[in-house]
Image (tube, helix red, strand yellow):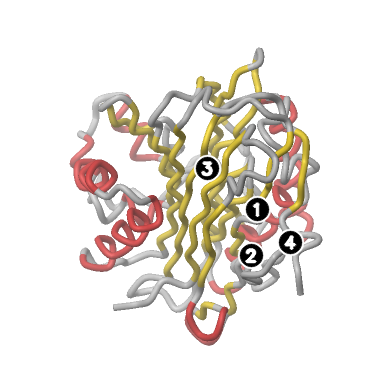
Amino acid sequence: MSEPQAHGSHAVDVGAASGSGASSGHGTADQGGKGYGARGGPAVPADADPERDDARRSSPSLGIRLTYGFGTDRGLRRELNEDSFIAVEPVFAVADGMGGHEAGEVASSICVRTLGASSIIGSRAPQFTANDLEDLIRDADQRIRSEAGGHAGTTLTGAVLVEESGAPYWLFFNVGDSRTYRLSGGTFGQISVDHSEVQELVDIGRITEEEARTHPRRHVVTRALGTGDDAEADFWLMPVEEGDRILLCSDGLSGEVTDDGICTILSTVQDPQEACDELIAATLRSGARDNVTVIVIDASDLGGHDADAITVPRGGLFAADGDARLPGAPA
């Protein structure tokens, strides 16, 4: 069994009282604080220093507690891990690079590092719109095209915790066939819509969802960042509900584990990091023909806090090309 390259978890209160010790969690990786993929490729979590100093920032009075975990693995068939991810509040995203060898990992890494350089990183539920996010994603697309010359691309799926009319909302986004799921109030479903040839065939009734899982064109995407003619993202704005569980994943998970299997794990494994670990383990048991990356985010205690100052911990970032640190992260 291949070992996860990077994993960790964090729990933080949005609007928690100053000095209340509201943040806790950890980010870990094997091999002495770093995870290693094939051929020694480094995975450097942004919170590699367990004695980090947390930054204090002001926040709207939005009572919400987020607990999240993350993980990535190159799988059992691939030599390299071309997936990248960012889990640094308020931005959570998974990018699945395409292009083979070093090209795909460059594309996905540029994508998450562009998100990580945003001015909202470390904020609590910023007033950040779909138009603002669209500009950020367009910037990532242009940077990938400039550096890779159109020969590499990446999918992107994720969520930003934002403030809308004084309340916390999820701003979901997606380009390609990486996926965002939501488990809430006993209901499980896919938020994002795959931009893929097989999804188009499903939509017009040519094939079933089950047939799409084994279709020979199942890996062909119709939208991607950095390559092709269409890099337009879809966006969804949804209020945060008590008990929300959000899953972001590359198609390395959804291609190996059915939605029913994913739902079972999310419904029965309480801790988000343990849920991530079990989702990756289920993928490996199924053959793991592709890289797999997962982020699980839980929302709770809505309305439970009413103070302005909070503690903001560092999250995790895995850039597949090895340049994994956020600006300002400890060396």
Q: Amino acid at mark 4?
A: Asp
Q: Marks 3/4: CA distance?
A: 30 Å
Would residue 318 be found to the left or right of residue 183 on screen?
A: right
- Judged by depth in the image, the label closer to the viewer, 2 or 4, is 4
List the residue tagged with mark 4.
Answer: 53
How far is disc 2 from disc 4 in space, using C-alphas?
A: 10 Å
Residue at label 1? Answer: 313
Tell me, for residue 47, which label it has, or none.
2
Residue identified by numbered label 3 = 157
Q: Amino acid at mark 2?
A: Asp
Q: Is residue 226 left or right of residue 34?
A: right
* Pointers 2 and 1 in contact (C-beta within 8 Å): yes
State the CA–CA distance, disc 1 to disc 4.
8 Å
Q: Residue at x 64, y 18 (%)?
A: 164
Secondary structure under badge 1? loop
Residue 222 percent location from the top left of the image: 49, 40
Which residue extends farthest top?
165
- Outermost residue toward the front? 20
For residue 31, above or below residue 150: below
Cβ–Cβ under 8 Å for marks 2 and 4: no
Q: Which amino acid type is marked by label 3?
A: Thr
Q: Looking at the image, is mark 3 or mark 1 earlier in the sequence?
A: 3
Q: Give the SS element for disc 2.
A: loop
- Crowd band around label 4 with a 10 angstrom C-alpha radius: few (<14), some (14–19), many (20+): few
Image location (x, y in percent) of residue 271: 35, 51
